[in-house]
Amino acid sequence: MKKLLLVGCPNAGKSAVFNLLTGKNRKVANYSGVTVDFATAGFRSNAVFDNKLEIVDLPGIYSLCPHTEDEAVTVAALAGECKELADAQGVVVVLDFMRMESSLKLFLAIRHVWKGPVIAIVNKCDTTNQKERISRSNLDIKLEVPVISLSALSDSPQSIDAFIRKGIEKITEINTKQLLLSQRAYNDFTKYFPTVESNERIILGDEKHVHTLIEQDSIKATEFSQGLSKNKNCPRYNQTLSVDRVLLHPVWGIVIFTLTFYLLFLAIYSWSAPFMDFIDFGVASVSDTISALLPSGFIKSFLVDGIIAGIGASLVFLPQIFILFFLISILNQSGYISRASILTDRLMARFGLNGKAFLPFLSAFACSVPAIMATRTIQDRKERFATIMVLPFITCSARLPVYILLIGTFIPQGKIWGVINRQALSFFFLYFLGTIVALVFAKLFRLSFFKGKSSSFIIELPHYQRPRMRQALKEALAQGKIFLRKVGTIILFFSMVIWVLSTFPQLSVDQGDGKSEAQQKALALEKSYLGQTGKFIEPMISPLGFDWKMGIGIISAFAARELFVSTLGTIYALGDVDENSVGLRERILKEVNPVTGKPIYNLAVAWSLIIFFAFACQCMSTLAIVKRETEGWKYAIYMFGYMLIFAYVTAWGTYRFLV
């Protein structure tokens, strides 16, 4: 099967061409050494033709001088340095009709390095006049390759398929030129591919010489593109200018931006709730069914509390991830993401980040897992890692059960000055606090571990276009599959570890005699390794006002923060409870220290516990996705450590201040 590489500038329509050619036979592959996801699939027409073709949709690039991981991977594929793509036999370059000059610069650069057949597709030719203009320009003769003009949104896949098959078979020329990089570009390249060495395929050239070659390509690109797109007389160009006058307006642009991303946040936070509840219900139903079929014992507990609970902990994040990436795809296809980045760049720059960090920050209010995945849009590696390292500070939805329980129990419902609700103000404070701390730590990271100049925020604004729902759905589904494959296995592993710690050693028959089922569960948890660990760490957490029971809750919350509430219900022999349980609230108010005779829970302890949960990285799902996105456990362990220390110190300070 022949393998073709699909290359082009960002927003040139590569994905649309890819989907036309492959249909539903799409799969995502993650090549070794990088975290960039590739789409690769066979042509739909393979069922008809003997000559089987497979196409790989590479990340969009502007030049062969890589400055981001995405760009480096594409350049590595073209230069023969990506071993998984070493058998590629042709390149399909997608040219953007609305940005012909920049597209042709990239095309000419590719012709300097690629050793096999190259064909060109001029996309976004939406009218017959535009297609005729390409035909009359003799662009195929000038570029010395087959050229077709089309609109991936409206043209039939059969015509594109036939053109590619004919073009690949027709060209027999082998280009043996090499990839010439300046020292600066080579250094950028080796940031992402440290194993790359200067060899017969990649050679280092003088900075001035490389610049001269680029200038020559620019002159040719300008000459070839003259009279083709005629942007100033193009209706889409004029429409884009008109819309940008509103969306990039210093006042109205901010208002529309705020409303747009408020709806995005609302969708992730609220619209996903019914689906998450449905998944919870489904997992609970499966658990109940298996519990009814199996007798009590080790096997039943392992399946229900270990395996099924771990699977449920993975599946419950899918609705948020799907909605996030579906809406991101819609906004990105429409051209609005680039505008949003411009609007937020000035604020984020004060903290060492750029405008593209805003979307992950916003997404983190729902969940850190999809937010960390959304940092892939940040080009600079140091800026991206700095963003990843602070996102768990943002108040996510998983913390709400703990906040609701403690604020509802210890903060009265009265109003300040007869206007401001005390409990609502407490929630607002926590959301505000998490965001400010995240930005401050981002600045500290950019001045220390991820030190470096803020990357120049240069972005090419694409023309507005109608997004394709099918493409957005495919991208969202692909990201969901990646999450389950890469992160779900880690979550399942940690869930089983926590199950083992909370199950063994088991109670003897004598220890359970005369006790109700709820009391037996409470005693079993106390005597388990998890309970023993809670008692072991009690001297370390007592300065925060915590006892061993809270320690068990904190440890179990590592699987999912929501488990803190249910763990307290088990410890106090209350059975199944939630954050709104009146019985649980009354029980913790009555809890008394056996030594001092004073209540264990009070306002100081409640706020100390809230602050600890606000700043500690009590989420194995977050650590799992950090491991996946940073290619190892180093940064995940570092994140857990520094956030735990900061949470401990601030919780201690809070307790001492209020006690």
Image (tube, rainbow, N blue to C red):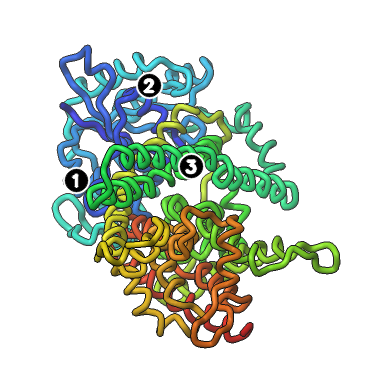
Q: Amino acid at mark 1?
A: Gly
The image's mark for residue 80 is: 1
Q: Residue at x 47, y 22 (%)?
A: 153
Instruction: Give the residue furthest to the right.
Output: 418
Task: Tell which circle, 1 or 2, labels the residue nearer the N-terminal end.
Answer: 1
Can you identify the residue that label 2 sits on? 148
- Tag 2's secondary structure? strand
Q: Amino acid at mark 2?
A: Ile
Q: Residue at x 41, y 42 (%)?
A: 284
User: Where in the figure is residue 262, as x and y percent of width and height?
Assistant: 64, 47
Q: How many marks?
A: 3
Q: Nearer the viewer, residue 75 or 408?
A: 408
Mark nearest the camera among 1 and 2 is 1
User: Where in the figure is residue 252, as x and y percent of width and height?
Assistant: 74, 47
Mark 1–mark 2 Cα distance, whole angstroms, equals 27 Å
Query: Is 50 displayed left or right of 457 in the figure?
Result: left
